[in-house]
Image: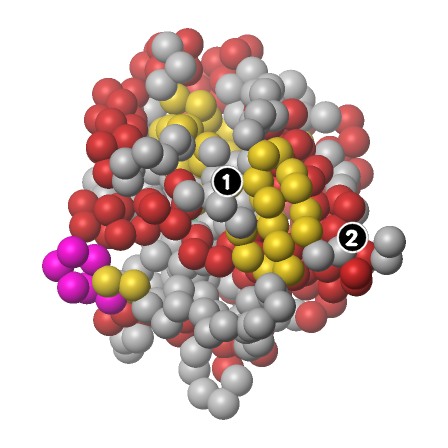
């Protein structure tokens, strides 16, 4: 059967290896969209204030579990936000107790709520040594924050300036290069990842838009995120990587909701909210690349394998939609604040069947 004629895909339930669930009313509004499709998710710690200790990660995990709609099974995998003063013992205790799955490195000021991030990797030497010994993954926001570096070059410069030296100093440290956006990142992860210990998440939106989307007919704040979308040739490299089925690439939506007024502003927030349609969007990319047969590796197998977790037993069915319907325009929190989901230029072609 040709890839184009595939109408139904049954795969082990996928996980989202990078998501922002926020807290409070926003958490209650966005969580159902992630929890209805994904079995587990790596939950980013950039709350205000950030989740910097095991105790805070435990409280946050319980808030997420309490906000779950009835009858939905979902496991939040918690992360700790590294700072210059992270306590290595607290981190290792959290990991041993199964409360904390991984730790996130935000270079200071790299993105939304990253002002508490790490100023210099040298400041967290003992933390990284401990993580390396324990096999605890380090998740990196791969952009330098030097204002002299052009915003479109920050990921490529990060590879040379930070990632390569980090891999040299901590060769056994498991690293996930989060939400990659460039051919430079693909080249590096494809070659280094073969040795093991290095992987990358790829978002749906970076597979679907290039930087032109932000400026089509005017400024388009709902297509603005960090790392910012790059040129078309980078998007093509990402599509090749994701749809190859190679073990070092897996699904991480980086779904990052902000209220409408925070996005549509003179200084709009970075972040694209893709959770409502993430799986359908990814499926479309794989279908267009003629690689639906590799979707299971990317969405359901490569992530658990890197994190040393079992593949989910439950199955999920994706179906081709016959009659295209309009996508959701916006969702409301309980206090009637609006969040605008990512919208494709064309209606969704896939949907998730009830599982
Ligand atoms: C994220 C957010 O809003 O928390 N924004 C984004 O553009 N991706 C932060 C992040 O992951 O960089
Ligand atoms: Zn993110």
Q: Position of residue 153 (x, y in %)?
A: 60, 61
Provide the major secondary structure of the magenta segment.
loop
Total numbered badges shown on the rendered structure: 2
Q: Secondary structure at mark 2?
A: loop
- The one of 79 and 344 positioned closer to us in this rendering: 344
Q: Local crowd at mark 2 within 10 Å, few (<14), some, or many (≥20)?
A: some
In the rendered structure, the answer to whether residue 153 lies left or right of residue 19 reads: right
Give residue 355's mark.
Answer: 1
| Residue visible at 56% across and 67% down in the picture | 348
Residue 355 painted magenta: no
Give residue 291's mark.
Answer: 2
Q: Identify the image quadrant of residue 285.
A: bottom right
| Residue visible at 66% across and 33% down in the picture | 302
First to last magenta residue range: 333-338
| Residue visible at 24% across and 71% down in the picture | 261
- The one of 54 and 350 positioned closer to us in this rendering: 350
Q: Secondary structure at mark 1?
A: loop
Residue farthest bottom in this picture = 217
- The one of 240 and 158 positioned closer to us in this rendering: 240
Circle nearer the N terminus (2, 1): 2
Q: Position of residue 250 (x, y in %)?
A: 63, 40
Note whether residue 75 is visible: yes
Q: Position of residue 112 (x, y in %)?
A: 34, 53
């Amino acid at each position: 059967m040709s890839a184009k004629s595939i109408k139904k895909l049954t795969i082990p339930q996928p996980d989202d290896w990078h998501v922002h669930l926020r807290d409070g009313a926003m958490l209650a509004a966005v969580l159902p969209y992630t929890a209805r499709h994904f079995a587990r998710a790596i939950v980013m710690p950039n709350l205000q204030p950030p989740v910097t200790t095991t105790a805070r990660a435990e409280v946050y995990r319980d808030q997420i579990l309490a906000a779950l709609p009835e009858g939905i099974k979902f496991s939040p995998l918690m992360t700790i936000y590294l700072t210059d003063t992270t306590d290595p013992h607290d981190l290792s205790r959290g990991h041993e107790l199964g409360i904390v799955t991984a730790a996130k490195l935000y270079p200071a000021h790299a993105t939304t709520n990253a002002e508490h991030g790490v100023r210099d990797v040298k400041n967290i030497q003992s933390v990284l040594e401990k993580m390396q010994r324990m096999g605890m993954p380090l998740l990196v926001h791969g952009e330098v924050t030097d204002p002299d570096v052009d915003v479109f070059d920050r990921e490529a410069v990060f590879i040379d300036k930070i990632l390569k030296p980090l891999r040299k100093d901590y060769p056994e440290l498991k690293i996930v290069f989060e939400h990659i956006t460039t051919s430079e990142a693909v080249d590096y992860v494809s070659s280094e990842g073969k040795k093991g210990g290095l992987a990358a998440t790829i978002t749906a939106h970076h597979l679907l838009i290039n930087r032109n989307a932000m400026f089509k007919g005017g400024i388009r704040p709902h297509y603005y995120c960090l790392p910012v979308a790059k040129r078309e040739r980078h998007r093509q490299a990402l599509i090749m990587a994701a749809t190859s089925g190679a073990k070092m690439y897996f699904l991480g939506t980086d779904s990052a909701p902000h209220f409408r007024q925070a996005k549509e502003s003179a200084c709009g927030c970075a972040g694209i909210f893709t959770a409502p349609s993430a799986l359908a969007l990814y499926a479309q990319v794989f279908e267009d690349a003629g690689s639906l047969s590799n979707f299971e590796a990317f969405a359901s197998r490569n992530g658990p394998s890197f994190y040393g977790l079992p593949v989910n037993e439950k199955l999920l069915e994706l179906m081709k939609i016959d009659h295209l319907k309009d996508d959701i325009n916006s969702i409301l929190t309980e206090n009637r604040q609006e969040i605008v989901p990512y919208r494709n230029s064309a209606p969704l072609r896939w949907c998730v069947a009830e599982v």
